[in-house]
Image (cartoon, grey):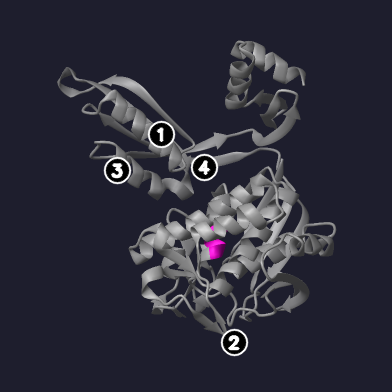
């Protein structure tokens, strides 16, 4: 089982994650050339050697139209549109564009030369960022705008990490608890505590800690990438390391300022998963169905219901939700929002899983996606229901016959 472990003892930022992951590749410079050909407006990736506390690693710089941000990864990349003018002066040049999430989606979907899968992952990360900023500033997501230089710099980091993870293709990603730093940091709105508000919002449900190092160690972009891709947080699993990468930050501390990425093999995959459940006896079938849809949309791994008998002989429903530990807080909020329960029970379980991947094949019947799973000495492959249903409707055949056609391809 190919496992990627991220050591976040000095936090996480997009450039540090990018640098660490490039060191896991057989041809890092060739990959940098790929990044520079993707089409991010004005972006240029520069990979250079870096030594921190006697440890050799890699540092990644991103120039946007020949400029770099004034500080390594500004602390908050977004602001409410109505609070700031739409002209930003940077290095003597005026930039008149502040990208909304919609404008970023336009760049990603219409201009970047990337597979659709990676474009979707980039937008997942931006959604996490925008939703966090929305909650922090108390404005709708549509009113969140990103500074032009900061936007392209963050987009460069997010794009690079998504492409690198697609290239490395780990079966699972595990990370240590996140060191966020301590003290205060200056941002567009003044001085704020570390972790910065957007970072703290994103890290809800993710194990994190402060420490004696003064400064911002985890940026909003780094936190959003972790939230999107890391399956579990904890100690390094038992694994045989094959490659190790060191992604260096720009600043110097007494401790080596890096993200360490370790790629290797684990024989068993075991995840911690959270079970949340509640009993209800005053919701209609339609309300329960809608709540189930909303819980899946909020990121639940599984939602299921069981008919039960409750007090006073009332028929009721047991609603059970399984989710990753990092999503526990969001899932709890969603359960209270979409059900009538007054209390939620929590349990922590260990889950043994097969490594899964989704592959896409072009057939004479159109695109068919397959879910492949393997591990523990077994291998399984199954075509996606939605694709089978489409074939069945188009051909006027049964679902069983559509599955047989797809399996023959």
Give yes or no for contact between labels 2 and 3 (Cβ–Cβ under 8 Å): no
Residue lying at the far bottom in this picture: please name it.
92
Q: Is residue 270 magenta?
A: no
- In the picture, the disc for residue 91 is 2
Give the mark, 3 or 1, whose residue is nearer the N terminus.
1
Q: Give the secondary structure at mark 4.
A: strand
Determine crowd level at label 3: few under 14, some 14-19, many 20+ residues with C-alpha closer than 10 A: few
Q: Give the secondary structure at mark 1.
A: helix
- In the picture, the disc for residue 337 is 3
Q: Residue at x 51, y 72 (%)?
A: 147
Identify the residue position indicated by label 4 in the image: 272
Question: Which residues fall within the magenta stretch?
Answer: 221-225
As displayed, is residue 3 above or below residue 225?
above
Q: CA distance from mark 1 to mark 2?
A: 48 Å
Q: Toward which corner of the image does residue 38 lie, by quadrant?
A: bottom right
Q: CA distance from mark 3 to mark 1?
A: 13 Å
Give yes or no for contact between labels 4 and 3 (Cβ–Cβ under 8 Å): no
Identify the residue position indicated by label 1 in the image: 293
Q: Is residue 224 magenta?
A: yes
Q: Give the secondary structure at mark 2.
A: loop
Determine crowd level at label 1: few under 14, some 14-19, many 20+ residues with C-alpha closer than 10 A: some
Give the mark, 2 or 4, whose residue is nearer the N terminus.
2
Quarter of the image for the N terminus: give it: top right
* Coordinates of residue 44 in the picture (x, y in percent): 72, 71
Tell me if 334 is positioned left or right of 92 in this view. left
As displayed, is residue 157 above or below residue 213?
above
Give yes or no for contact between labels 3 and 1 (Cβ–Cβ under 8 Å): no
Quarter of the image for the C terminus: give it: top right
Determine crowd level at label 2: few under 14, some 14-19, many 20+ residues with C-alpha closer than 10 A: few
Judged by depth in the image, the label closer to the viewer, 2 or 4, is 2
């Amino acid at each position: 089982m190919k496992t990627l472990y991220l050591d976040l003892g000095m936090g996480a930022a997009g450039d540090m994650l990018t640098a660490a992951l490039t060191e896991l590749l057989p041809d890092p410079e060739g990959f940098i050339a790929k990044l520079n050909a993707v089409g991010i407006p004005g972006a240029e990736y520069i990979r250079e050697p870096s030594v921190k506390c006697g440890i050799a690693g890699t540092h990644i710089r991103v120039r946007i139209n020949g400029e770099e941000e004034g500080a390594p990864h500004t602390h908050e990349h977004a602001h409410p549109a109505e609070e700031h003018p739409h002209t930003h002066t940077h290095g003597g040049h005026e930039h008149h564009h502040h990208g909304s999430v919609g404008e970023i989606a336009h760049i990603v979907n219409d201009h970047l030369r990337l597979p659709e899968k990676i474009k979707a992952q980039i937008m997942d990360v931006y959604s996490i960022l925008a939703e966090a900023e929305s909650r922090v500033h108390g404005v709708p997501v549509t009113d969140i705008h990103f500074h032009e230089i900061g936007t392209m710099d963050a987009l460069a980091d997010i794009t690079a990490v998504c492409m690198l993870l697609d290239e490395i293709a780990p079966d699972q990603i595990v990370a240590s608890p996140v060191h966020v730093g301590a003290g205060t940091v200056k941002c567009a709105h003044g001085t704020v505590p570390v972790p910065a508000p957007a970072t703290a919002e994103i890290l809800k449900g993710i194990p994190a800690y402060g420490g004696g190092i003064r400064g911002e160690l985890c940026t909003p972009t780094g936190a959003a990438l972790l939230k999107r891709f890391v399956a579990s947080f904890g100690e390094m699993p038992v694994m045989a390391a094959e490659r190790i990468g060191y992604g260096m930050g720009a600043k110097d501390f007494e401790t080596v300022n890096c993200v360490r990425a370790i790629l290797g093999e684990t024989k068993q995959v075991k995840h911690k998963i959270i079970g949340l459940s509640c009993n209800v006896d005053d919701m209609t079938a339609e309300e329960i169905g809608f709540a189930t849809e909303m819980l899946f949309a909020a990121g639940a791994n599984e939602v299921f219901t069981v008919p039960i008998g409750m007090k006073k002989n009332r028929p009721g429903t047991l609603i059970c939700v399984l989710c990753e530990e990092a999503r526990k807080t969001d899932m709890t909020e969603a359960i209270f929002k979409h059900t009538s329960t007054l209390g939620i029970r929590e349990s922590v379980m260990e889950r043994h899983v097969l490594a899964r991947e989704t592959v896409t094949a072009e057939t004479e019947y159109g695109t068919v996606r397959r879910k492949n799973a393997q591990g523990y000495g077994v291998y399984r492959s199954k075509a996606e229901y939605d694709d089978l249903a489409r074939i069945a409707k188009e051909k006027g055949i049964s679902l069983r016959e559509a599955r047989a056609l797809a399996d023959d391809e």
